[in-house]
Amino acid sequence: MLDLMKLELRKTNIRTYINSTFVIFIVLLGFIYIFAYMPQVNPNDPMLELFASYKNIVSLFGALNMATFCILASVMYSRFVIEEYTGKRVILLFSYPIRREKIFVSKMIIVTLFTIISMIVCNILVYSIFGLSETFFPLVKDNITLGVIQKAIITTIVMTVLAAALSIISMAIGFIKKSTLTTIVSAFLLCSIVTNISSGTLNSNTVAIIVMAITILAAIYAAKIILKKINCMEV
């Protein structure tokens, strides 16, 4: 499996996605500061009170972070899977003396690991820079407590898993439709649905974990559907 993953990485320029992750990091870092500054725009606006605590900022940032990396992962799946299994490329792909399942699973592992690692590293850097700056030049009238740190860790784990799982589901939809655009649009819509479901319970870890569990099961089912279709494909 490791050799297959190395082969896939040779075929695809992974540096493009690394550069995209760096850009995402810069944008997300800017957004977390925008969230923190929002209450100062109009202190009398009750709607902006949502940004007045670190826990709410972490929840909102987590949702944005999840959506961003889910879309990035769907773009990667479009390149690693959708394009590979359409047109003339599939002839070359099926000519390898390797089981079809192993080829597909290697592609999925690459995208999933890249999404998880890049998202966790991005979160650590953003939270570290933001937390350090808030220590000396606070924008939020709140305290960074152990509860806030625990919230950031749990949110990072949940949102990372959601991004990886939702991208697999969107990839399955795009695979069935044989469309790169459908894959990316599906990722955006799925993220919107999940965000709306959990928006009313920003500080409820229970709801987030339930949504995560359902999404994981749906992703496993979606992957099995694709595997079945790949095994039934004829060149």
Image (cartoon, helix red, strand yellow):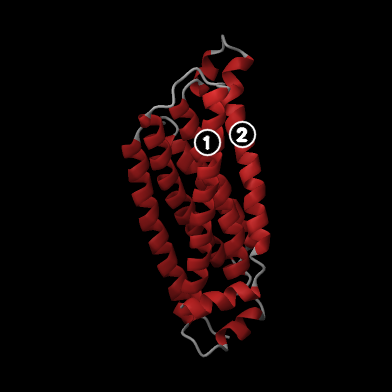
Label 2: which secondary element: helix
The residue drawn where x is 67% and y is 48% is 23
Upstream in sequence: badge 1 or badge 2: 2
Give residue 209's mark. Answer: none
Q: Is residue 2 visible?
A: yes
Residue 191 horizontal/vertical position (percent): 51, 45
User: Circles 1 and 2: CB distance less than 8 Å?
Assistant: yes
Vertical relation: 195 (above or below) 56: below
Residue 193 horizontal/vertical position (percent): 48, 42
Q: Amino acid at mark 2?
A: Phe
**Residue with the most extreme top position:** 44
Q: Is residue 203 visible?
A: no
The residue drawn where x is 41% and y is 41% is 153
Mark 2, residue position: 31
Q: Quadrant of the C terminus?
A: bottom right
Q: Determine which quarter of the picture holds residue 44.
A: top right
Which residue is nearer to you in this view: 135 or 198? Answer: 135
Query: Dot 2, how many residues are within 10 Å of its Cα: few (below 14), some (14-19), or many (20+)?
Result: some
Q: Amino acid at mark 1?
A: Phe
Label 1: which secondary element: helix
Q: Is residue 26 left or right of residue 227?
A: right
Q: Determine which quarter of the picture holds residue 227.
A: bottom left
Mark 1, residue position: 61
Q: Is residue 162 left or right of residue 189?
A: left
Gap between marks 1 and 2 measured at Cα? 8 Å
Residue 218 horizontal/vertical position (percent): 39, 57
Q: Determine which quarter of the picture holds residue 87.
A: bottom right
